[in-house]
Amino acid sequence: MCRNVTIKDISILQGGWFGILATGVDNLTIENLKIDTNREGMDIDSCRNVHISNCSVNSPYDDGICLKADYALGFFRDVENVTITNSLVTGYDPGTFLDGTYQRKLFDKPNSPGPTGRIKFGTESSGGFKNITISNSVFNNCRGLALETVDGGHLETSSSQM
């Protein structure tokens, strides 16, 4: 486990399996990132006190920002106190977000499943999700927001502006 981690002011092109994989981090700040990948942009797993702001994530085949609460630490740990604000999640062809061409050729074919790219809670969700706030975020050419608990974790929702 780690504490007091800051990742800011970088761009990631084709970042591998995950652009960012943070597991068991307390006090994580992610600011001003541009991620353009064919896999997941960010996985935030079993972390607490996370602030994600001013980030742009293009991930047409997978999740843009995915919160997870699994058994990776050897015990179940909830994801708690997460703020995602002023962010953009898209599903354009890989590489076309960073180069500014915003192409959608891969999904214009008949029977194409379409882009994924979304903010998602719930894959690998044996633990729970507490105090998660998403504000002033934009979804473009993607599937938006997914709230799931496919592995039996706990998710409560409330909103004053849904």
Image (spheres, helix red, strand yellow):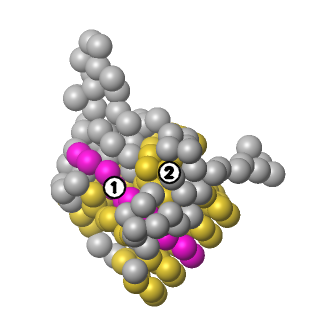
Residue segment shown in magenta: 38-49
113 or 10: which is nearer to us? 113
Is 153 rendered above or below residue 54? Answer: above
Q: Residue at x 39, y 42 (%)?
A: 117
Vertical position of residue 83 compared to residue 111: above or below: below
Q: Secondary structure at mark 2?
A: strand
In percent of width and height, residue 33 lies at 36, 67
Total marks placed: 2
Q: Residue at x 50, y 80 (%)?
A: 26
| Magenta residue check for 136 | no
* Residue 118 figure quarter: top left
| x, y percent for residue 110 | 27, 12
Q: On the image, numbered disc 1 is attached to which residue? A: 41
Badge 2 is on which residue? 125
Position of residue 31 relative to residue 112, above or below, is: below
Q: Is residue 53 visible?
A: no
Identity, as a three-letter code, of the amino acid under mark 2:
Ser
- Quarter of the picture holding the N terminus: bottom left
Q: Residue at x 42, y 61 (%)?
A: 71
Residue 49 position in % (x across, y down) = 57, 75
